[in-house]
Image: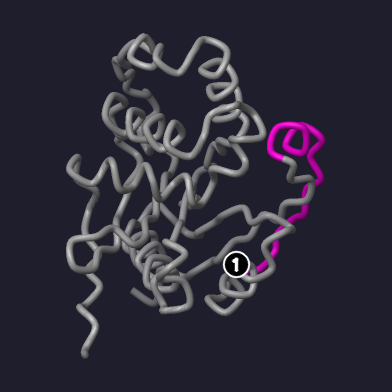
Amino acid sequence: MTAAPITLEPMQAKYNPQVGRLLVLGFGGKFQNLTNMNDGELALFFEKLLDHFPPDPVSQRMVATQDGEVIGTISVKWKSESAMKQKQKLPSWKNFNRFGTWNLLKMRFGLYFFDHKPEAGECYISEVVVHPDHQGKGVGKLLLQWGQYFAETKQSLDRLSLYVSGKNPRAKHLYEQLSFHTHSQTKSLVWHLLFKEMKWEYMIMRFSKEKL
């Protein structure tokens, strides 16, 4: 039986619950080191983030779907070309009171340190996750190739970047196959205390606009 085709499409609100669960599969272990929340609670937390916090105007999320199921996602962001940053009116964190004040504080703290502020010309991959049942089928490569195409077609961008954990050689190997190379290595005590991940590699892919 032929497998259904994999489709890439921009994120829609209807996918928030599925993407929330997917983010737990990709990052839940890290955030469970911070809180006492289980997988279901973390999935709901990420879903509520997607529900209540509007996407940044200098970011883009795509999902890979098969038979209507979200099997992968990628999120990229870049630095605004505008000198004046537009201020977004963010909703109240009161929407998250159900998770408990202490858990909420720790999650906000963790998300702050997990964030990366792109430099001019940099398109940063903040998340790329593939459902475990679909890994090894080319989904991750498809998402990353979309990220490369997206960055190459934006005139202000000249590189694609990401962080990979030293505990994830499989992912690093995939990135190297796609022409990423290690730009720097970091040992972070803060990340170790928060996420039990000491070693990280910052990888970049540069490209020439002359090819376009």
Q: Is residue 73 left or right of residue 15?
A: right
- The quarter in which the C terminus is drawn is bottom left
- 148 or 44, nearer to the observer: 44
Colour approach in the figure: one colour
Left or right: 49, with 112 as reference point = left
Residue at image location 48% in from the left, 52% down from the top: 125
Q: Nearer the viewer, residue 204 or 3?
A: 3
Residue that badge 1 annotates: 171
Please provide percent x and percent y for residue 25.
Answer: 48, 51
Q: Is residue 150 magenta?
A: no
Q: Which residues are magenta?
A: 181-195
| Residue at the image point whose x is 81% and y is 45% from the top | 187
Does residue 121 show up? Answer: no
Residue 86 % position (x, y): 32, 22
Judge left or right: residue 116 versus residue 61: right
Farthest residue, direction bottom: 1
Q: Secondary structure at mark 1?
A: helix
Circle 1: residue type? Ala
Above or below, 61 against 8 in this view is: above
Locate residue 78: give its quadrant: top left
Q: Residue at x 35, y 57 (%)?
A: 155
Where on the picture, by quarter, is residue 204?
Answer: bottom right
Q: Quadrant of residue 195?
A: top right
Above or below: residue 159 compared with residue 78: below
Where residue 181 sits: x, y (%)?
A: 65, 68
Q: Is residue 15 visible?
A: yes
Q: Residues within 10 Å of mark 1 (few under 14, many from 20)?
A: some
